[in-house]
Amino acid sequence: AQKITQTQPGMFVQEKEAVTLDCTYDTSDQSYGLFWYKQPSSGEMIFLIYQGSYDEQNATEGRYSLNFQKARKSANLVISASQLGDSAMYFCAMRESLEYGNKLVFGAGTILRVKS
Amino acid sequence: DAGITQSPRHKVTETGTPVTLRCHQTENHRYMYWYRQDPGHGLRLIHYSYGVKDTDKGEVSDGYSVSRSKTEDFLLTLESATSSQTSVYFCAISGINSPLHFGNGTRLTVT
């Protein structure tokens, strides 16, 4: 079963506007973590933001915020004030219980293109 | 940047030959991972290690083996390379309950 689903293969956003990248997950664990990574065209994987399942506040890191809706099992990434440098592939990932070895399961990714 | 180095960065090999990719870290992290990235699949876990000589299989482990004889090195071996193993391979490291930090990847082409 797909554990992480990113339904948007590609997205466009106008520079300086906000954009939301969707991510839904599937787990029966009570304790889990959700991550977002950015992969620019140069290929490296850059960690952006983390949300723990018990965190009551949505995570924020600069222009990135994670809209965590536990009941809906969604963990959408919101990028505010988009910049040209935000054009990249974005991956949502989940870590289930630590007894499974701190592994991450990734979604298929969303390509974001920022237009000037 | 997390101290993680993958080698080689690029490799072209022929079907049926063995191939070894190396991942080296300077962070003394417990966990090390090998993922492969293919279009439409995101990153899929091949094998991971939770300590020296402690390894386990991931989602797509068939045709791959790993070894970790030292904390800092994690080797991925393709026993007999096939065209389906053409991919970009990423090594990652992490501490307990912390994000994974990735190397720059190895682009492997099997002809």
Image (tube, coloured by chain):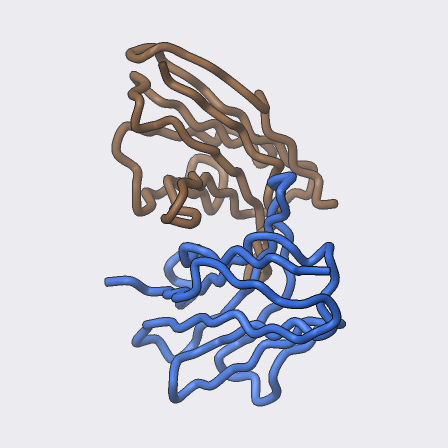
Chain colours: A blue, B brown
Residue at left 29%, top 20%?
B82
Residue at left 66%, top 75%?
A18
Residue A75 pos. (x, y %)? 49, 76
Image quadrant containing the N terminus of chain A: bottom left
B43 sits left or right of B102 in the view: left
Front residue of B106/B50: it is B106
Residue A111 pos. (x, y %)? 52, 55
Front residue of A70/A83: it is A83
Residue B19 pos. (x, y %)? 41, 17
Quadrant hosting residue B49: top left
Quadrant hosting residue A71: bottom left
B33 sits left or right of B29 in the view: left
Residue at left 61%, top 73%?
A19
Name above or below for residue A112 compared with residue A68. Answer: above
Name above or below for residue B11 compared with residue A67. Answer: above
B80 sits left or right of A72 in the view: left
Residue at left 56%, top 47%?
B30
Front residue of B32/A60: it is A60
Residue A102 visible in the snapshot: no
- The image shows a total of numbered marks equal to 0
Image quadrant containing the C terminus of chain A: bottom right
Name above or below for residue B77 compared with residue B37. Answer: above
